[in-house]
Image (spheres, coloured by chain):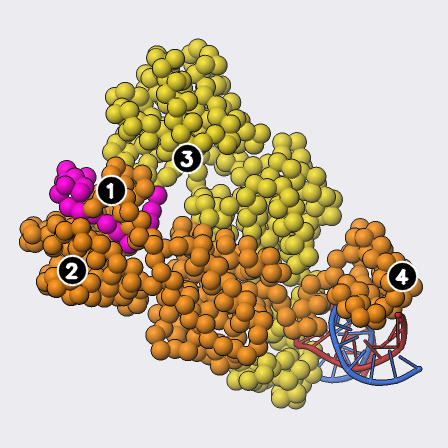
Chain colours: A orange, B yellow, C red, D blue
Amino acid sequence: MARVSLKDIAKEAGVSVTTVSLIINNKSQNGRISAAVVARVNKIIKEKNFQPNTIARSLRTGKSTTIGLIVEDISNHFFATISKTIELVANENGYKVIYASTDNDNQKARELLEMMQLQQVEGFIITPTIGIKADIEELIKQEKPVVLFDRYFPGLPVSYVVLDNFKGAYDMTSHLVKKGYKNIAFITIASEMNQLQQRLNGYEQALNDHRLANSASLVLEFSYDTSREDKLKAIKTFLQKNKKVDALFFSTNYLGIIGVEYMTNNKLTIPKDYGFVSFDDHELFKFLKPAITVVAQPIELLATEAIDALLTLIKKKNMGVIQKKIPAKLIHRASE
Amino acid sequence: MARVSLKDIAKEAGVSVTTVSLIINNKSQNGRISAAVVARVNKIIKEKNFQPNTIARSLRTGKSTTIGLIVEDISNHFFATISKTIELVANENGYKVIYASTDNDNQKARELLEMMQLQQVEGFIITPTIGIKADIEELIKQEKPVVLFDRYFPGLPVSYVVLDNFKGAYDMTSHLVKKGYKNIAFITIASEMNQLQQRLNGYEQALNDHRLANSASLVLEFSYDTSREDKLKAIKTFLQKNKKVDALFFSTNYLGIIGVEYMTNNKLTIPKDYGFVSFDDHELFKFLKPAITVVAQPIELLATEAIDALLTLIKKKNMGVIQKKIPAKLIHRASE
DNA sequence: GTGAAAGCGCTAACAG
DNA sequence: CTGTTAGCGCTTTCAC
């Protein structure tokens, strides 16, 4: 059951390899090849179960029909779901996807980029780490199709598909204000990554627009590597110092989960003691009683926008720049 | 900045392509090439930033250094985590991985298999659906390295790495018996998939061995597509009919979660009203008060065993069969 | 309408 | 120690 090659088919059919190649690539159109030959060749292809060798074809055409997907962490629900959609759409369009996780490590990100270029991927979808800006610029210079995902480098003329973090935080904060909360605390991570920064901005802007005091003390910032226990303690201290706080807005779901833990530990109830909302949805938030109101990312949409953008970049060689901010979705439940 | 080829390097260095090829493949060993030449060529390679074209190499050698990973659903935490480890180990060994999800659909599984063969993957790790047994057999006949994952076809001489579901359920049930529970209910899905079947078997065997009545009525079986609401109702009916039940053993985590919901809805407390354990761990189980005791899958271990198995199958052409059942891990928390 | 032949970039006999 | 050369399987130009 050795692999049959195009040549075998040609021999069997008594035609040249050219003819067979034209037929399998549907270039037999405009009457180039006689219908009879097409039929005969196709029959033999079926019989012998011939499948063109993708690698040879790639070598010849210079296209690998492979795209590279680099995410922060594929084992994370958000990225896993994203990947699934991307893979699906890519497959539908005849592309394979090879993927890898950076774990937010610049060095690893760079290595992965290199590995994928070696593999001659035709384009990239990348969740960039802070340190690979230069590498991305290099990619662009080489006219490789690239779309950044989840975060981007403001100012860089590179395509991206990200959530509109500012507006998401802005809307949720406004919602809280309208509900009557007067002292909304924002609990976040101090991060160079612009998504979190923009969530903070959205929160502050909303407070300003509603003429509520935007005292810095209502923002609690952790550093990235603060332990769970320390966060719990910090929340306690923060809340004891700021007794007027009546609502808690967590900037990510894993922070929100710690918040939930704080509430249970201290026998506090939602929303009686504090209005409680979080950025990013999570299984747990739906499950809790009361369920937690969140500003959620439209995961499917983000994924299709990203892969669509990449596919159009690959198709049209004119290398435009596609930059999209996708609106977040407020999901009202019962925690505020 | 056009790609430089091996030929360019050879010309630049004033040597033949063979020499360069030998050098980049580290076959310059046993004194074949003079150290001086090696140094010179390497220098030029660095300068020109030459990277061998993987596709050409694949075409020539017949090896794609790509493996295919087919899981049930990459957006599921279990498979996502598995994938991450597999990808990591594969990369370390110079392999790329292309992946896809079957969503438990036979047709889709078959298409993915075909797509990946087209891509000339060197081996497969597959979470099989019920209906692709024949396709797997075909793969084996063609001597393609294959390792089945998570489930397998008993009797088929195909490599696999799966959890020891029987023993996991057996041990948990025994543990419950030893704790003094007399009427342990087992809540599961009626499925053709042998993992769940074996969990049930483990439960029943343990009861028999401990000479506890194994009346069929202590097993509650849902069909795969029963809705959440219907499951909740069915649990209620079941428990009303079987008042003596004192412990609940759920056969998967998503069933366990519904179980938790049932408990909260009905103001039942764990473990006072019912001892409560589940197969498969979950974020929620760790978080709850009391936290739920589970029999967990050692995810990392399963993944490394699977990729290791595949890699050794690829390496040694003698096509052995590697079949492993990995022991599950009882995680004692406070729910029983 | 169809075929001959070149060549994508690389590896590996084989020759010297 | 190093070079010549024949392909891997396919697409594509050009010729008939």
Q: Relative to C14, is A320 on the left or the right?
A: left
**Amino acid type shown at disc 3:** Tyr
Of residues B297 and D9, the one nearer the viewer is: D9
- State the CA–CA distance, disc 1 to disc 3: 23 Å
Q: Which range is magenta?
A: A264-283
Secondary structure under tag 4 reads: helix
Q: State the residue at coordinates (47%, 34%).
A: B327
Q: Quadrant of residue B259?
A: top left
- Regarding residue B314, the answer to whether it shows in the image is no
* Image position, residue A28 (x, y; %): 80, 67
* Image position, residue A187 (x, y; %): 20, 56
Same chain for the residues under marks 4 and 3 in the image: no
Q: Which label lies toward us, 1 or 3? A: 1
Q: Which label lies toward us, 2 or 1? A: 1
Badges 4 and 2: C-beta atoms under 8 Å apart?
no
Task: Relative to B149, say whether B218 is above or below.
Answer: above
Residue annotated with mark 3:
B254
Q: Is residue A282 magenta?
A: yes
Q: Chain of mark 3?
A: B
Q: Chain of mark 1?
A: A
The mark nearer the N terminus, 4 or 1, is: 4
**Amino acid type shown at disc 2:** Val
- Regarding residue B179, the answer to whether it shows in the image is yes
